[in-house]
Image (spheres, rainbow, N blue to C red):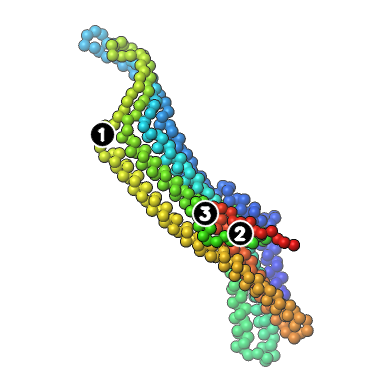
Amino acid sequence: MILRALAVGFLLWASAVFAQQSALTLEQALASANTSHPDLALAESDRAAAAADLASASARRDWSVVFDAGARHVKPMQGDNTDDSFARINARKNLYDFNRTRYAEDAARSEIAARDAALITTQDRRRLDIMARFFDVLVADQQFTADNEFMAVAYVNFDNGRERHALGQISSVELAEMENRYQDWRVRRDLSERRLRATRAQLANAINRPGELPGDLVDPPLAGNQRPIPEFDALLPLLEVNNPRLRAQRAALEASRQRVASLRAERSPSIDAEIEGAEYGRTIGTRDRVRAGVLLNWPLYQGERVDARVAREQATLARLAAEYDKVKMDLGQTLLETWQEAQHLQSVARAAARQNVATRDLQLERSRAYYEVELRANLGDAMANTVEAKLRERRTEYQLALALARLEALTGTPLPAAPAQTK
């Protein structure tokens, strides 16, 4: 048919426009999940900030060296103007601050752990997004093929109807209904055609190649869809222990607790070592050229400054605890819904889709037999229905693969391997 030939020509043109010399595989697309991307850059910048906080906390006990100098003359009560210039270097190091630094370091390390877990969450989210966008392209391609097939059938029926109408075999109303069906399918095909490019643009953005629209995609075998799905009661403990978001929340909670302890330690004394060397333009009895000693600094009263900062951090701690409980509750519900979806797709929807394909194949064979003996001419409808049934089957497999991948991301653990195929 002319329209079918045009459709083939369009797909060939689209492959050239979409600027990929070889078909893109799912593995190649997923390989970009851990490469440069704005989402990853944001997570990595947060992790770098936490690492800087750790370095800052550890530096509290580093040597502090200060040099100062002054050129001046003074006029004493007796005598001439006297040179009172000086040059002085002072080195000071904290020896012990009663765990103030240790608490600050522990808080920073917990914050780094939280950012590391958040980075894993970002990587998992990217992998799921890439998978979803990859499958969207495959569905768009198959949907366009199906809609184009239905439109071609509707056009042939309409074209035959015009001949029958000219012969007076059908009424104008019947012909108008045929044209309406053709126009409806033409609209659907046009929308499917537009989605070919839109889904590829989304995939290009997901793999951080904006503007580089992929052409052909390799439909993955999705052998992992055969994996057994553990019971929900077995998955829930894995969620609570391994889920990256929960791990990030727990680490953030611990960081806040350590910051509270560090702030409270601000009331504690600190012991410093100090060494100083100096040269003076004039000699006074109270001036020393070299001095060394140990200093005790004990803040006896600081007003409400420490209490206010502790209260602020305790409020943050309470907020983080509430957020942890909320995240745990939400993730438990998400796990349940995802588990139910995977169970339904694997045990019910897949069987229904496969049965639908088998039925359409039988109908196609019957239509071919009728077509060959010129008893019926509905071969086009049967072919289109077969394409639609296969699209439903593949869409079910894509949804199942995504559901299983979400289960793994939620539990932070791979699902059991698929059973070996017996020959």
Disc 1 residue type? Tyr
Give yes or no for contact between labels 2 and 3 (Cβ–Cβ under 8 Å).
no
Disc 2 residue type? Phe
Q: Can residue 136 be seen?
A: no
Q: Position of residue 87 (x, y in %)?
A: 36, 17
Q: Can residue 355 be seen?
A: yes
Q: Position of residue 85 (x, y in %)?
A: 33, 15
Q: Tell which of 171 and 345 is nearer to you.
A: 345
33 left or right of 66? right
Decide which of tag 2 and tag 1 comes sooner along the chain: 2
Identify the residue under disc 1.
301
Identify the residue under disc 2.
134
The quadrant of the image that shows the C terminus is bottom right
Q: Give the quarter of the image for residue 284.
A: top left
Q: Position of residue 196 (x, y in %)?
A: 61, 64
Q: Give the quarter of the image for residue 53.
A: top left
For image coordinates 45% across by 42% down, the residue present is 110
For image coordinates 31% across by 11% down, the residue present is 282
Q: Tell which of 15 and 95 is nearer to you.
A: 95
Q: Number of numbered discs present? A: 3
Of marks 2 and 3, the one in the foreground = 3
Q: Please tell me the numbered disc located at residue 238.
A: 3
Q: Work out which residue is located at the far right of the displayed protein and give it.
A: 373
Q: Tell which of 41 and 209 is nearer to you.
A: 41
